[in-house]
Image (spheres, helix red, strand yellow):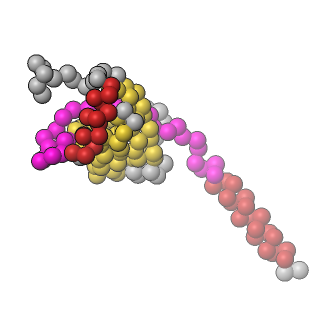
Amino acid sequence: MPLRPFRYLLACAFMLALSACALFPNRDPLNINVVGIEPLPGQDLEIRLAVKLRLQNPNDVDIPYDGVALNLDVNGRLLASGVSDQKGTITRFSEGVLTVPVTVSAFAALRQAVGLSEQQSLDNLPYELRGKLAGGLFGTMRFYDSGTLSLPQPANGNW
């Protein structure tokens, strides 16, 4: 009868595992959206931009974060990527804006310019933003946002 204690132990472990799942109630994911893109000073052939993300916490607990990484595609092509080691907390049922610096390489800018010459317009460019927010109750959270951008037109044909 050595199997009886093993079965009892296995049944107890199974019950403990089921009760542990009840300790983690269902939580809604953060809502993460692009709310702005602004120029930053760059170096040499690179272009720097500040991508502003709105983080909304629809849960009844605070969610801490510790770092963010993102890729920004415009017109179906990778335009910029960036990381930030910012730390913070989105308090329960609230929102905040996180600014992430991104870099546009000369090659990516050239690729975009070739694509824009076919389109002939800087209005309503489709974008996709993919990224991850590290830390918090949910561990690393991946996010996605898409929409259209209207880039500023040059004054008198000059930037």
Q: Relative to residue 37, is residue 123 depicted above or below?
A: above
Q: Quadrant of residue 74?
A: top left
The residue at the far top in this view is 156
- Please report the bounds of the magenta region as a residue range: 21-48
Q: Residue at x 75, y 70 (%)?
A: 9
Q: In the image, is residue 39 part of the stretch drawn in magenta? A: yes
Image coords of residue 110 (percent x, y): 24, 40
Residue 71 or residue 107, whichever sits in front:
107
Question: Can residue 57 be spotted in the picture?
Answer: no
Image coords of residue 43 (percent x, y): 12, 47
Relative horizontal placement of residue 156, taking residue 3 as reference (left or right)? left
Image coords of residue 23 (percent x, y): 60, 50
Q: Relative to residue 77, is residue 147 depicted above or below?
A: above
Residue 54 or residue 45, whichever sits in front:
45
Q: Quadrant of residue 125?
A: top left
The residue at the far bottom in this view is 2
Q: Relative to residue 33, is residue 130 depicted above or below?
A: below
Relative horizontal placement of residue 89, taking residue 11 as reference (left or right)? left
Question: Can residue 124 be spotted in the picture?
Answer: yes
Q: Split into 4 quadrants, where in the image is the N terminus?
A: bottom right
Query: How many numbered marks, from 0 up?
Result: 0
Image coords of residue 127 (percent x, y): 37, 32
The residue at the far right in this view is 1
Q: Residue at x 25, y 46 (%)?
A: 107
Residue 44 or residue 2, whichever sits in front:
44
Q: In the image, is residue 36 part of the stretch drawn in magenta? A: yes
Q: Residue at x 45, y 45 (%)?
A: 142
Residue 107 or residue 104, whichever sits in front:
107
Q: Quadrant of residue 90?
A: top left
Q: Residue at x 11, y 25 (%)?
A: 158
Q: Split into 4 quadrants, where in the image is the C terminus?
A: top left
Relative horizontal placement of residue 8, taking residue 64 as reference (left or right)? right
